[in-house]
Amino acid sequence: EPYDLILTSFPHFVGQIKKLGINSEYFRIGFDSRVLKRLKHQKKDINFSFVGSISKYHNKAMPTIEYLIKKNNLKIFGQGVKNLPIFSKIRRCHSGEKWGLEMYSTLQRSLISLNRHISTSKNYANNMRLFEATGMGSLLLTDYKDNLNEMFVIDKEVITYKSKEEASDKASYYLRNQDQLKKIALAGQERTLKDHTYEKRMGELKIILKKYL
């Protein structure tokens, strides 16, 4: 109640907040393109990676991640693995935590970056990895969401999956066809640098704030 305006990157939260009598606007997250100037271009020596948190909020993604470890030698980086059972396949195959520039470096080194959303996002594409992976020039393989095509052209700038089997098949296909992989990854990076940087977002924020000030 003390707030005049609440911004959210979850589009389905806007209506819920407005029902409480509080102004709300949809405001997407993005990519800080200055990172590219901090890192030298690196050899892509990781075929397929997942860089992100593993926690109780990601339980639905565990079967997919475990399946891709087995079928596609998916490399896992990130925090939270210590909370998994000792016998967990994810824990056994974990490659360490990555933070800051080291995290961005890992994404840049990856030919393909796996993405998945927590249940809070429902059927909306909304997390940092969408823009971090594409911004660093990795091919984004993400779970399909209804609004994803508002951000990227599917199959031309990013690729999607609706099941663990489809994710596995597409990862295998693009690793065998790296000319296509590189073409889509480059297009995804160009789209992020054109439409999804924080410089771009600040222009969008200015319009929102003018509406209410």
Image: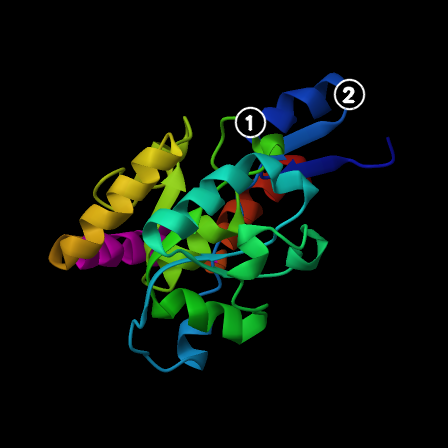
Count of numbered circles in the view: 2
- Res 122 label: 1
The crowding category of the residue bearing disc 2, from other C-alpha atoms within 10 Å (few below 14, some 14 to 19, many at least 20), is few
Residue at the extreme top: 19
Q: Residue 191's spot in the image, x, y percent?
A: 30, 51
Of helix, strand and loop, which one carries label 1? loop
Q: Is residue 55 above or below residue 135?
A: above
Q: Nearest the camera: 121 or 55?
A: 55
Q: Residue 147's spot in the image, x, y percent?
A: 41, 30
For the point 40% across and 49% down, the residue is 70
Q: Is residue 174 magenta?
A: no
Q: Is residue 32 above or below residue 128?
A: below
Q: Is residue 180 above or below residue 118?
A: below
Which image quarter is the N terminus in? top right
> In the rendered structure, which segment of residues is drawn in magenta?
181-197
Of helix, strand and loop, which one carries label 2? loop
Which of the colour schemes (rainbow, by chain, secondary structure, one colour) is used?
A: rainbow
Asked which quadrant contains residue 176, the reply is: bottom left
For the point 52% across and 51% down, the residue is 128
Most common SS among magenta residues:
helix
Q: Nearest the camera: 200 or 188?
A: 188
Tell me the CA gap for discs 2 and 1.
23 Å
Is residue 213 found left or right of 127 in the rendered image?
right
Asked which quadrant contains residue 10, the reply is: top right
- Res 171 label: none
Residue underneath mark 2: 21
Q: Amino acid at mark 2?
A: Gly
Q: Is residue 34 visible?
A: no
